[in-house]
Image: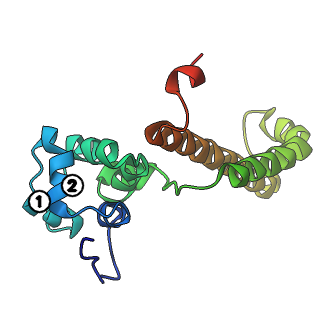
Amino acid sequence: MPKVSARPDKTMYMTVREELALTREKASMLISAQSISADRLEKIENRRLLARPDEILALAEAYKAPAIINYYCTHDCDIGGRYISEVRPKELSQIAIETLNSLNKLVQVKDRLLEIVEDGTISEDELEDFRTIKSNLDKIASAVESLQLWLNESIARGSLDASVISR
């Protein structure tokens, strides 16, 4: 059993590797196509070195953990950190409940949305309603991202066939 770090501020790269009970040496062998040495992996995990996108893709594939890609984009990439929301893995039932709840709220206010955008501007008295509607849309977008991550993880683990999903 590999030694587990006691660091309180672990990166996802380290956490996932440890959950898989891999030493850095074994992880390095899994991702040998990208020539990530155990030493380089240690530096990436401890934020002493920034991983390249191709290395992150290799880690995500080797660990069968697509969430690593979102983690990289939201934590280690300046553009992603600014424009992409972090998506945390959730159970399918939780994703479905959140999606349906947000959709139900949106159905309730769809007429108000039409009233607000009809003239192409948002007046001061419409602003609060618009913020609420936007918040619901953001929740739906987040649920879609969560569902996509769930699908990618299920495909990576082999519990879903990608070809069946894409039909």
Indicate left or right for 4 with 163 as reference: left
Q: Are marks 2 and 1 in contact (CB under 8 Å)?
A: yes
Q: Quadrant of the C terminus?
A: top right
Q: Residue at x 77, y 36 (%)?
A: 117
Q: Amino acid at mark 1?
A: Ala
Q: In the image, residue 6 lies at what x, y percent?
A: 30, 83
Q: Residue at x 52, y 44 (%)?
A: 149
Q: Does 100 appear above or below 76?
A: above
Which residue occupies the foreground of this view, 30 or 45? 30
Seen from the viewer's position, the closer of residues 116 and 73 is 73
Q: Tag 1's secondary structure?
A: helix
Left/right placement of residue 46 relative to residue 20 reads left
Q: How many marks?
A: 2
Where the N terminus falls, by quadrant?
Answer: bottom left
Q: Which residue is mark 2?
A: 27
Residue 13 in the image, given as x and y percentages of width and height: 30, 60
Coloration of the structure image = rainbow
